[in-house]
Amino acid sequence: MTDGKIKIVDTTLRDGEQTAGVVFANREKVRIARLLDEVGVHQIEAGVPVMGGDEKKAIKEIVKLGLKASIMGWNRAVISDIQQSIECGVDAVAISISTSDIHIEHKLQTTREWVLESMIKAVEYAKREGVYISVNAEDASRSEMDFLVQFATEAKNAGANRVRYCDTVGILDPFATYDRVKTIRERVGIDIEMHTHNDFGMATANALAGIKAGATHVGVTVMGLGERAGNAAMEEVVMALKHIEGIDLGFKTTSFRTMAEYVSLASGRELPAWKAIVGSNMFAHESGIHADGALKNPKTYEVFTPEEVGLERQIVIGKHSGSRALVVKFAEYGIQLNDDEAAELLPKIRSTAVDLKRSLFDKELVYIYEDALGNRA
């Protein structure tokens, strides 16, 4: 976890399960952990050991799998919490405490001094136990910078390996994220993990901005699952790093769709067709201009291939389709349309799509063909 490369820290099993109404069965948690490890996640935040019961049992089962990924337990800045994590056999602990004045005053009802003291004691205890330590600055994005720098410095001096910068309520934009993370890196010199929420739709953008500013770790969840509007989505962060920033983390991205489908089923949450990277519409082309371009050269409208994330290209026939797509689609049925036939069918197909308010199924297209051209054929 300290070789200087960007590390992906997946918290689907902790923050993802904190989504309102989501509960993973133990067998599902174990299966998800296996999937995360198989795709290449560097560290898995497996849950909250102090909850005991099934939670602690599942974490122990995950530890026993002998995965390549580091296994982390989440804790408050309380020594008894950390003891529960140690009992599970995890090799890493997250020690979380609020650093914003609004949290300190209204949630914790204490002082900055108490926050620092509690954090230091917890870190020193964890350090003696020989585990990797992430100190989580909860609500860091609303924390006063000088105090945040002091907090990170004290954490480093106590033995922490990194600080988790938590945009707990998702209020940052990429520009503010870059400035704040850069300041901490320059003034403290400690590894930083980005933990961003999506309340304003900027979780992935903020995560990338933090990396540009020097963050070494990124907290993510599958499909962006998480509290309220969710977290930065793992598949988005990994693919954006690869194709936009030129940073290939070596992930098995061909399993992304399968993994998203499983987490969707286990969480009871929809995998939207329009979901970035793994949604079924990512490579579905209906618009005549787009479909024509994609058929001639997929790179005209696709940044990466569908196979790279476990999807397939689809040419969808509907209101916006053109004759070129129609010829290709009917060729799949063994029907060779000429240009005149395609031009004759197109108005009927578009009219039917408008009436039905959707694209057309294969059988519907064949029926329209048979009604219009079947006798002629």
Image (spheres, grey):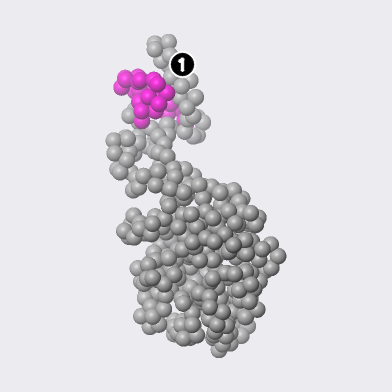
Residue 187 percent across, percent down from the top left: 38, 83
* Amino acid bearing label 1: Asp
Query: Residue at image x 42%, y 29%?
Result: 350
Residue 334 located within the stretch drawn in magenta: yes
Which residue is pictured at 35% across the width and 20% down the height?
Answer: 336
Image coords of residue 331 (percent x, y): 37, 24
Label 1 residue SS: helix
Question: Chief secondary structure of the magenta span?
Answer: helix
Q: Quadrant of residue 173?
A: bottom left
Looking at the picture, tell me which residue is in the foreground, 151 or 57: 57
> Magenta stretch: residue 372 in it?
no
**Residue 55 % position (x, y):** 66, 64
Quadrant of the image containing the N terminus: bottom left
Residue at 49% over, 70% down: 167
Magenta span of residues: 325-354
Residue 288 image offset from top left, x and y in percent? 35, 34
Q: Quadrant of the C terminus?
A: top left
Q: Is residue 89 left or right of residue 353?
A: right
* Figure check: 264 above or below 334: below
Query: Dot 1 corresponds to which residue?
Result: 371
Res. 307 visible in picture:
yes
Extreme-right residue of the structure: 53
Left or right of 118, for residue 54 = right
**Please, which residue is most extreme toward the bottom here?**
113
Give the residue at the far top of this rendering: 375
Observer-nearest residue: 135 or 296?
Answer: 135
Look at the picture and state if 282 lies above or below 376.
below
